[in-house]
Image: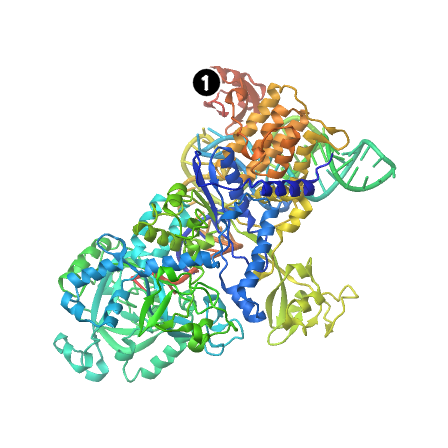
Amino acid sequence: MEYDFRKIEANWQQKWKEDKVYAVSNESAKPKYYVLDMFPYPSGAGLHVGHPLGYIASDIYSRYKRLKGFNVLHPMGFDSFGLPAEQYALETGQHPATTTEKNITTFKAQLDKIGFCYDWDREVRTSDPQYYKWTQWIFLQLFNSYFCNTQKKARPITDLIKKYESKGNKHFTPEQWNAFTKNEQEDMLMKRRLAFSKYGEVNWCEALGTVLANDEVVNGVSERGGHPVEKKKMRQWYLRITDYADRLLDGLETVDFSDSMKEMQRNWIGKSEGAEMEFEIVNRESSGVSVDSADRNSPLTTHHSHLRVYTTRPDTIFGVDFMVVAPEHELVSVITSAEQKTAIDEYLHYVKSRSERERLAEAKTITGCFTGAYAINPFDGREIPIWIAEYVLAGYGTGAIMAVPCGDQRDFAFAKHFNIPITNIVGSHFNGEEANATKDATLENSGFLNGLLMKDAIGVAVNKIEELGIGKRKVNYRMRDAGFSRQRYWGEPFPIIWTDGVAIPLDAEELPLELPHVDTYGPGPEGEGPLANIKEWVNTPTGLRETSTMPGYAGSSWYFLRYMDPNNSETFCDRKASDYWNQVDLYIGGTEHAVGHLLYSRMWTKVLFDLGLIGYDEPFKKLLNQGMIQGSSRFVYRIAGTNQFVSHGKKTEYEVQPLHVDVNIVNGVELDIEAFKKWKPEFADAEFIFEDGTFSLSCSIGTSNEMKFICGVETEKMSKSKYNTVDPTELCVQYGADTFRMYEMFLGPVEASKPWDTKGIEGVHRFLRKLWRLFNDDLKGKVWNDEKATDAELKVLHRTIKKIEEDTERFSFNTAVSTFMICVNELADIKCHKKEVLEKLLILLTPYAPHIAAELWSQLDNEGSVLDATYPKFNPALLVESTKEYPVSINGKLRTNIELALDLEQPAVEQLVLQNEIVQKWLEGKAPKKIIFVKNKMINVVI
RNA sequence: GCCCAUGUGGCGGAAUUGGUAGACGCAGCAGACUCAAAAUCUGCCGUUCGCAAGGGCGUGAAGGUUCGAUUCCUUUCGUGGGCACCA
């Protein structure tokens, strides 16, 4: 009987489905364990071999925990809102709901093929109204809450209103509050709500009439069409995540994430301590002389007579040689001198075309422009030129910095580039060639700070600044409030109606606010989303509906809770369910979500906790990062500005743009021209220059060997957009799910990134067939028997039990697969076909290769399912040895092995070692200096 | 530019606490079985010198600590990923 994996896997998958063996109950006497995968976006491309890496790991661990007696929740769902579906709708007119539904069906079929133990009755889809009803509901909780700075937690906004009514705040009395108009009051409240609206900048593309995502903008122009992109101010929704910065930092101490992951989150939050201080501004050109403080109220310097900067190094105050203000800073238009106006305007125009990413990432080119205005150093009265430069962003700190060229390399480069004289405040620590960012130098040229060590001077300087009333100590965060609206269709609509400029939330009973049908997915007027086009939807008796939708991370910020109670129509997740399942015990996913998704869901969890809706404020107890499976991409080369493509060998002769081409229409490196033309409409009329230089308008497939179009090859991230994906389903059909699962694990450590290579899968498949032959002979049929196992056989088994358990516990699945191979090799060598040994092995194997394990388990005439078998217990007594083959080194180099009794002590060992022929040969009659003996490890003779 | 990760045979990788480097698998080579092929089985398989016995070298590179280093430290180079030049 042969190993017919196709039949076996289909049978068991069918049976498991019928028997609902993966159904999980919220009530159980067993201890609970929650294993979660980062759920996928169901792209049209389907699953590729990179996705299941983490899913297989989590599946193995879930099944392992189940065998170990836990009630395991291991759900799966879909992050089904998103831009690609909408883009597809724009191109084809198909409703995103339709294509999404189709994609999910494909995904589920692909996932099921791999044999995962999901309880599909708990599936969630973020785009399902019954799901996003609760996303909207949580949004309303955020909208109706504020962060109480005393209690450091979210509280109902009604508490704040009561406080304003009875006590007022720093800026107004209760009487003033009550006298405010409704709009004024709402504006005040908006400044505290956890979900709030304000004006923010978006990437606006005039030509496309739409707002673009960051990755739709390339080099300042739109990816589609290459149109110019500018910043545009629009009303946007935000989440006040900055209020949670400290708690997000503190919470990291309580979770089991990798150090690098925690580091990334800390860097993103970017807490820094320093000082905010004000510099007086003068405009020398108008007055001819600098204005002293008595002139503060002169017309020249009113309103904006001060420039506020944030610095972490107030100790370097005497080294300030210039100021840099963000080009968007409100002061720029005020302080710019007449002389500099043209230059400044030109520079502003340039900056407007630059994306934030570009402004910050480009270190080579230094740009900036002098405003004509000066600031006064309050400590020495020096006049400091004020510049604007793109590397300072309006949103960070105060949008202005004091530049200290001798202590900051970027400031140094700027000063050099614009010939600004540099003041040295650290003496010999500054060599004039590059900045020195030390805190350990002694200050010079620094007035009252002279002679102080810089790190000590920081506190002294801040005290002085506070004393003079020109500034104060300040903690700053890099993190900004999270933009929460998108000018898109395929996302959760906001349950908000704008009435006379005030955002009025819908009542909970009105949820879900479903996405209305649209005829076109194109943008609305003035950069609004497609929803703005539906007048009858936007206009309500009480006002206008918000036309933005929520971003992708809205639904994914709380999905781990919905799995616990997926069908509840009364609440997002019953408290009983969230108390039972509690935190996610193991969360597996890629590092690409290190800061985005993980921080957002951590914040939402904290808010829900603060409001008493759940019982814990960190969602994920342990996080395991799976590595990326890289793909092997193929490229075609388009001659710039044409529709001509040139073969790889000829590409250097033209100015070309490399374009990804689907690996599935490339045979090795040779492009299938006809398939390429059909691939995308814009390539239908493509022309080709072949490897031999011949040219063709409408080529028939290469007749001669040289008439080939060769693609470029590169290893990079496997993703749909790079068209380098490999379909796991095909591998399951060819080799079986069990082989596929084990091969993915066998590739290397789960955390490591590695390129996909299908070659090698044969080895794992051969292993499973060899396992099969321990039970069945192709010709003779059944070969397993009921004989009693020998000590040698039990030794093999128990060594395997120990190793598999250890490896599974520490997520070292690749070495576990090796261990299975070694075990099967050894059992085959000693011709062990005994049920007593084999059935234990099958239980160990179940998490890794459930189908073959279940099949063989039932062939052994076992009752019940192997999925719920009892995990074998390792018996150390069986592995006890009395002797060991010790490696013997001379001066650290291995020379021989000696078998010694394990209970021997150093003196006896030394004696035996010195009698050894080979040791004597190396000693050449001399006495050894020392003999190192580590029991059960090794012996080293030092000569 | 900064941050993180990583570097071991032809390839994927193993070595869990500083203690036998290269487990396991792929590819390759030789052989058995077969009319033949597939499947399976056996052996070899870092490199170099040597008929052999046995040596030399070897975990990106160079130093260091140690009886002993893939593992720890310093310097340096390469690769991959991320980024927000955050003041």
Tag 1: amino acid? Gln
Front residue (pair A486, A580):
A580
- Judging depth in this view, the residue of A217 and B54 nearest the camera is A217
Residue A169 visible (yes or no): no
Residue A150 visible? The answer is yes
Report the side of A482 relative to A466 (left or right).
right
| Residue for point 66% across, 36% down | A767
Where does the image place residue A80, in percent across and percent down from the top left? 50, 58
- Return the x and y of residue A406 as percentages of the image width and height: 30, 63
Please tell me whether residue A928 is drawn above or below residue A156 in the rendered image.
Answer: above
Q: Chain of mark 1?
A: A
In-image side of A660 versus A693 (left or right): left
Extreme left residue here?
Answer: A294
Residue A906 vs B12, above or below: the answer is above
How many discs mark residues in the rendered view?
1
- Percent position of residue A36, x then y: 47, 46
Q: Is residue A447 above or below residue A231?
A: above
Q: Residue A760 lies in what quarter of the image?
A: top right
